[in-house]
Image: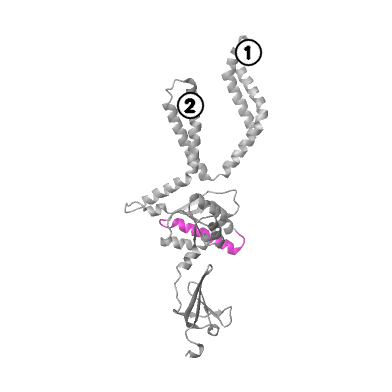
Amino acid sequence: MMKRVVQVMFLLVGGTLGVLFLPYLFHLSSFTDTPLFNNPYVAAVIGALFLFVFSTFLTDPIVNFIKWLEDLLLKAPILDLFFGSIGLIVGLIVAFLLGSALNNIQIPAVTALLPMLLSVLFGYLGFQVGFKKRDEFLNALFSIRNVGKKKDGEAEGTETAQSPHKILDTSVIIDGRIADIADTGFLEGVLVVSQFVLTELQHIADSADTLKRTKGRRGLDVLRRLQEGDGKKILITDEDFPNVAEVDLKLVHLAKKMKGLVVTNDFNLNKVADLHGVEVLNINDLANAVKPVVIPGEEMHVLVIKDGKEHNQGVAYLDDGTMIVIEDGRSYIGSAIDVVVTSVLQTSAGRMIFAKPKHSKSSRA
């Protein structure tokens, strides 16, 4: 079908060119005296047949180019096309205004070619500016919206405006604590969620495994909560890296491009981002940092619930999940006792407290 359309276009263009230019060629030749060749319909048919012959060689390359361009446009993110089109329209308007201002030039060649050159130049520049400055336009729109919400009329603080983007990964969205942290106001700046992360969440939410499906739906609920929260700034970006297969690497590349930070609780992503020089905000590190600080010699009242790995050890837990290993605590399993902290071990997996019973078994009433 496309091939037929291209051939028809060649016929129409050939007929038009024949009507416009063939009479001048006939005038320069001996065909001027022949009434048949003075007929514009004859000129149109000759021009159409002439270009139709050329179309046999050019149709296939043109059809392949159109298909390639169609695939390219279909794969491009919608925001890229939208802002690129706006930039193209603005560029063409500027070219038209400049061309109108330069109409007084009395050089025929310049007058004929200048509007076309200006249209190509400013159309291309406008599309490139709209395409590459998309994120800056979105940020400007968010800034205007946030300033409009200020009830006291004060300007928005520069610290928030200059705060780097926080790029969320799939694990931290499913975890859900990011919404609670955002509600406290400690997390500043724009929270960025990429389309490939949303796609991964959708696949998890549609999984046949019940646990995965529950996690995926919880992640979507967390995003909805972030969007509906007062003062929250959520940016959904279609930015993608087709040549990169791994989602973690895509997040790293996106953080580099947007000069932002990756927010995660994935230990492996944390290491990959560090290797690429990208800053990371790890929710687990934050959780460990805000746990109550204990020092050797401090007393606690805990419930011993099971035995430890070593001989005669007991294990208890604080409300935040911190494990307490109690020396000589096996005999207290099922009992609530007072213990004295002997040491604290901080590991990448969390904090571990070592303690011993404050009173021996024999001294209990």
- Which element carries disc 1, helix, strand or loop? helix
Q: What residue is shown at x 66% (from left), y 26% (from top)? A: 54
In the picture shown, does residue 319 fall above or below 210? below
Q: What residue is shown at x 46% (from left), y 67% (from top)? A: 289
Nearer the observer, disc 2 or disc 1? 2
Looking at the image, the residue that sits furthest to the top is 33
Q: Is residue 319 magenta?
A: no
Q: Nearer the viewer, residue 148 or 134?
A: 134
In the picture shown, does residue 122 fall above or below 276? above
Q: Nearer the viewer, residue 63 or 280?
A: 280
In the shown orientation, is residue 271 left or right of residue 145? right
**Label 2: few (<14), some or many (≥20) within 10 Å?**
some
Number of numbered labels in the structure image: 2
Q: Which mark is residue 13?
A: none
Q: Nearer the viewer, residue 270 or 193?
A: 270
Q: Quadrant of residue 19?
A: top right
Q: What residue is shown at x 43% (from left), y 29% (from top)? A: 98
Main SS of the magenta segment?
A: helix
- Amino acid marked by disc 1: Leu
In the picture shown, does residue 300 fall above or below 126? below
Residue 102 x, y percent position in the rendering? 43, 26
Residue 145 x, y percent position in the rendering? 39, 49
In the shown orientation, is residue 202 left or right of residue 184? right
Q: Which mark is residue 36?
A: 1
- Amino acid marked by disc 2: Leu
Residue 199 x, y percent position in the rendering? 56, 53
Q: What residue is shown at x 65% (from left), y 30% (from top)? A: 58
Which residues lie in the magenta part?
A: 207-231
Quadrant assignment for the N terminus: top right
* Residue holding disc 2: 114
Q: Is residue 219 magenta?
A: yes
**Chain-order first, disc 2 or disc 1:** 1
